[in-house]
Image (spheres, rainbow, N blue to C red):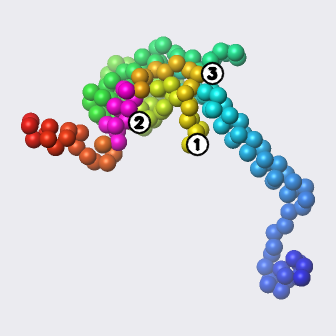
């Protein structure tokens, strides 16, 4: 039974695509697959993906490292990690940065969300990732892995609502 006859009997419209439209759709799908494959290959080679460089880095020139540390911004990133470990609060980090007159790359005030994104961005410890793939990046890390993990452990405990001190330590104080 033909598609048109089925459509008439069922009294529904059956959408169809011409061969050209179908080929175009498949072309888009294969283009998307090529983009994903290219980004995955970049990560496997240790190169940072597409998009703007994270705060603290600049894109390197052709033939250089994909990301180059911006010394001024990198110091702000280090300050964000230190202050977060001292205060255990993204809001207090924001207040600290504002009190020191430190603004984002675009000259805006910092937000708690921006601080949280920086704290969880593995690029700062020298890694690159795309989806589930992660590898050592070609760029220099701004944050030592131990400091990165400490900050993220604090974030995780706060997210889960656990006390920051162990019960045995809390009883002693």
Of marks 1 and 2, which one's residue comes earlier in the chain?
2
* Pointer 1 residue: 131
Q: Position of residue 73 (x, y in %)?
A: 47, 18
Q: CA distance from mark 1 to mark 2?
A: 19 Å
Q: Nearer the viewer, residue 98 or 87?
A: 87
Residue located farthest toward the bottom when viewing the structure as drawn: 9
Image quarter where the N terminus lies is: bottom right
Q: CA distance from mark 2 to mark 3?
A: 24 Å
Of marks 1 and 3, which one's residue comes earlier in the chain?
3
* Pointer 3 residue: 66
Which range of residues does the magenta coloring cover? Answer: 146-156
Taking the image as shown, residue 81 lies to the left or right of residue 25, namely left
**Residue 16 in view, yes or no:** yes
Q: Magenta stretch: dominant SS? A: helix
Label at residue 116:
2
In the figure, residue 109 lies in which quadrant? Answer: top left
Disc 2, SS:
helix
The answer to if 154 sits in the magenta stretch is yes
């Amino acid at each position: 039974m033909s598609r048109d006859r089925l459509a008439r009997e069922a009294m529904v419209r059956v959408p169809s695509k011409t061969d050209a439209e179908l080929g175009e759709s498949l072309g888009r799908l294969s283009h998307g697959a090529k983009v994903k494959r290219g980004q995955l290959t970049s990560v496997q080679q240790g190169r940072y993906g597409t998009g703007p460089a994270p705060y603290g880095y600049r894109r390197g020139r052709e033939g250089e490292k994909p990301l180059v540390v911006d010394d001024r911004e990198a110091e702000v990133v280090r300050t964000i990690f230190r202050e977060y470990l001292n205060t255990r609060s993204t809001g207090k980090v924001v207040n600290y940065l504002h009190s020191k007159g430190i603004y984002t790359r675009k000259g805006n005030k910092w937000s708690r969300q921006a601080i949280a994104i920086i704290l969880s961005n593995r690029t700062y410890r020298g890694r690159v990732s795309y989806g589930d793939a992660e590898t050592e990046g070609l760029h220099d890390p701004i944050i030592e892995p131990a400091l990165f993990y400490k900050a993220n452990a604090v974030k995780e405990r706060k997210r889960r609502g656990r006390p920051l001190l162990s019960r045995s330590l809390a009883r002693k104080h």
